[in-house]
């Protein structure tokens, strides 16, 4: 072969190799795109946005440190306020994102994660609580935050460990009325609450269910009032929770202790009901930035970053759980060397960090259903118009004291 032809072939081969290397480098430089599935319109939009604020802060932190695997993190919002929207939004984003994260609404998480599986995308859930989300055993679903059972345990522990002693009553002398919104979220928590409370010797007087979209909850409040419980225990969302509290005030229902689960600790509730009507009420919810540093290292730094970026106080504690959840996802992607569904799942299965490793006080260790077993709620009390972490003791600031439990 003539020298000139060999040189031409060599140059052509080098050009092809260089082009291939350039494409690989360009691909490596592309951001890791994460689809954030949450309600961004409608009644729950404020809270879907708050979760995504947490995701953005975690992405900012990662990007400032050079990204993940040399790639920046980019978030794409997918608006989903109901299960059908969850499916359609995943279908719209599947070709644009590498993984999915969510979700404020359990019913949306249920349908959206199933849709994501059809595209072999991880669905990393930071906030949805319904028990069956992990029990389904979907190979793409991983939950970094607490589940319904954890919230049920947290509420039962609050009743036995905080309410009972405060009311000077042994479990056998305590009575509880359980109320819940009727989706898979509230139903799964209420069922476990009943089991745990009765096993502790506490008498459950009854269980009431209502729609989160209800416009009149008078019957629900009157049923609870007629039972005359020591503790009114309610699981729901913000709109129905606020309506229950307003209706209880109108009907003169103020039991010795009111414990809300998953909602009731935000400025929206304060504005809707007023500080006097909330005074003394307990709320079992996601850990807040006021937790003690020994419980949640980095919580104060999260708060400062939030204020700097959004120029206001956090809307709800769910945002910090979302922030921590995305941190865990990025750690799993790093360990997996990419976003391949099976590799991320395998990396998640090996994650092992003790409690109090993250701002929320969470650790990370996934069970066989890929539920994080080291994530749990905390309990706040409304005191002078401010939600203050009071339980467990390690989470509370050293100078915190419990106020009378009966609502003002």
Image (tube, rainbow, N blue to C red):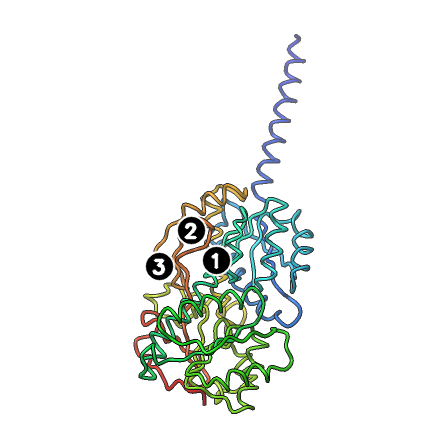
Q: Which label belongs to residue 73?
A: none
- Residue 17, percent from left and from top: 60, 27
Q: Could you give the CA–CA distance between mark 2 and mark 3, rounded to whole angstroms?
A: 15 Å
Q: Earlier in the sequence, mark 2 or mark 3?
A: 3
Q: Toward the viewer: 50 or 187?
A: 187
Q: Which residue is mark 3?
A: 355
Against 104, residue 385 (above or below) is: below
Q: Give the CA distance from mark 1 to mark 2.
A: 16 Å
Q: Identify the residue at horizontal 49%, vertical 71% (top origin).
A: 262
* Residue underneath mark 1: 325
Residue behind mark 2: 367
Q: Is residue 125 above or below residue 314?
A: above
Residue located at (49% from left, 67% from top): 189
Badge 3 marks a residue whose secondary structure is loop
* Label 3 packing within 10 angstroms: few (<14), some (14-19), many (20+): some
Please, what secondary structure does the residue beneath circle 1 have?
helix
Q: Rounded to the nearest whole Å, what is the CA distance between mark 3 and mark 1? A: 14 Å
Contact check, label 1 and label 2, Cβ < 8 Å: no
């Amino acid at each position: 072969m003539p020298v000139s032809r060999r040189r031409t072939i060599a140059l052509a081969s080098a050009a092809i190799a260089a082009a291939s290397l350039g494409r690989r480098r360009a691909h490596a430089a592309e951001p890791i795109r994460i689809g954030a599935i949450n309600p961004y319109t409608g009644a729950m939009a404020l809270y879907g946005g708050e979760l995504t604020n947490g995701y953005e802060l975690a992405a900012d932190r990662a990007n400032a440190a050079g990204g993940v695997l040399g790639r920046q993190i980019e978030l794409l919002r997918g608006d989903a306020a109901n299960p059908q929207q969850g499916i359609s939004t995943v279908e719209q984003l599947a070709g644009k994102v590498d993984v999915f994260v969510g979700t404020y609404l359990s019913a949306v998480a249920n349908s959206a994660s199933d849709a994501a599986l059809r595209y072999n995308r991880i669905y990393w859930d930071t906030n949805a609580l319904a028990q069956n989300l992990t029990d389904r055993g979907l190979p793409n679903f991983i939950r970094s935050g607490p589940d319904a059972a954890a919230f049920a345990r947290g509420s039962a522990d609050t009743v036995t460990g905080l309410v009972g002693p405060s009311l000077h009553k042994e479990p056998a002398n305590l009575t509880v009325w359980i109320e819940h919104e009727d989706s898979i979220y509230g139903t799964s928590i209420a069922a476990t609450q009943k089991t745990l409370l009765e096993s502790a010797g506490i008498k459950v007087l009854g269980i009431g269910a209502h729609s989160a979209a209800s416009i009149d909850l008078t019957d629900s409040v009157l049923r609870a009032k007629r039972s005359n419980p020591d503790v009114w225990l309610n699981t729901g969302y913000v709109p129905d929770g606020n309506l229950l509290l307003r209706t209880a005030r109108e009907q003169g229902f103020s039991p010795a202790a009111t414990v809300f689960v998953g909602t009731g600790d935000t400025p929206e509730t304060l504005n809707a009901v007023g500080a006097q009507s909330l005074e003394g009420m307990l709320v079992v919810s996601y850990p807040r930035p006021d937790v003690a540093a020994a419980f949640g290292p980095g919580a104060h730094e999260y708060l400062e970053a939030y204020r700097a970026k959004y120029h206001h106080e956090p809307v709800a504690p769910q945002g910090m759980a979302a922030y921590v959840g995305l941190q865990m996802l990025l750690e799993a992607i790093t360990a997996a060397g990419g976003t391949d569904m099976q590799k991320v799942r395998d990396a998640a299965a090996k994650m092992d960090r003790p409690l109090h490793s993250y701002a929320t006080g969470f650790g990370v260790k996934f069970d066989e259903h890929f539920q994080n077993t080291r994530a749990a709620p905390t309990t706040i009390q409304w005191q002078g118009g401010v939600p203050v972490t009071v339980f467990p003791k390690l989470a509370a600031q050293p100078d915190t004291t419990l106020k009378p439990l009966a609502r003002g």
